[in-house]
Image: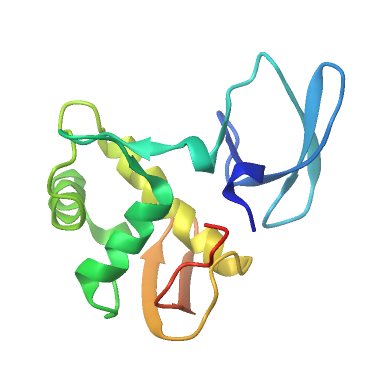
């Protein structure tokens, strides 16, 4: 699946897939419950392909951050993110992406980043074959097996 068609809508939980485009809005469908809703120009919506993590050198695309999580953890089970406090999240982020910009990447951004991956796994946006990742979103726990390589469309 193409990350350009996956949207994060400000003020709305979860991730959405672009379904169609109207005159004043776009229609999106929730990846989890398949409900549809309009997103108007006044609402902030970001394509996941456009989301990057700020670093001291250059911005790192979201797909590269997910791959980096796998590389750093060497295919082992990831940490229980929900049990980490703010300093624990910062330490975990530094382990994954040591050069991240500590002034511009906030803890709330880290929580969103780690909440995206379980949604990908649950709706099979990432293939499942070789290592176990357990990530905790603010609302639910998702354990899945995902492939060592990201799909070509990512």
96 vs 25: above or below: below
Residue closest to the eye, 26 or 12: 26
Instruction: Give the residue displayed 70% in from the left and 16% down from the top.
Output: 41
12 vs 5: above or below: above
Q: Report whether residue 138 is seen.
A: no
Q: Report whether residue 21 is seen.
A: yes
Residue 89 picture location, percent across and down: 21, 50
Residue closest to the eye, 50 or 30: 50
Residue 12 picture location, percent across and down: 60, 35
| Outermost residue to the front | 152
Is 51 placed left or right of 42 in the picture?
A: left
| Outermost residue to the bottom | 130
Which quadrant is the N terminus positioned in? bottom right
Residue 16, quarter of picture: top right
Is 77 placed left or right of 119 in the picture?
A: left
Is 148 placed left or right of 2 in the picture?
A: left
Residue 121 picture location, percent across and down: 53, 68
Residue 125, quarter of picture: bottom right
Residue 96 picture location, percent across and down: 20, 57
| Outermost residue to the right | 23
Instruction: Give the residue displayed 38% in from the left and 38% down from the top.
Output: 52
Q: Which colour scheme is used?
A: rainbow
Residue 73, quarter of picture: bottom left
Count how many numbered circles sit on residues in the image: 0
4 vs 79: above or below: above
Instruction: Give the residue displayed 52% in from the left and 42% down from the top.
Output: 48
Instruction: Give the residue displayed 42% in from the left and 86% down from the top.
Output: 130
89 vs 106: above or below: below
């Amino acid at each position: 699946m193409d990350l350009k068609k996956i949207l994060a809508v400000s003020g709305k939980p979860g991730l959405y897939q672009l379904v169609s485009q109207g005159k004043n809005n776009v229609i999106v469908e929730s990846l989890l419950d398949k409900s549809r809703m309009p997103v108007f120009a006044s609402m902030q919506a970001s394509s996941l392909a456009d989301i990057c993590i700020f670093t001291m050198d250059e911005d790192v695309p979201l797909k590269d951050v997910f791959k980096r999580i796998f590389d750093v953890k060497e295919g082992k089970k990831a940490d229980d993110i929900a049990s980490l406090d703010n300093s624990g999240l910062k330490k975990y982020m530094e382990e994954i992406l040591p050069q991240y910009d500590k002034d511009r990447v906030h803890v709330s951004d880290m929580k969103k980043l780690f909440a995206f991956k379980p949604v990908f796994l649950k709706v099979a946006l990432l293939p499942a074959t070789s290592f176990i990742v357990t990530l905790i979103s603010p609302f639910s726990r998702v354990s899945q097996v995902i492939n060592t390589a990201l799909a070509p469309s990512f």
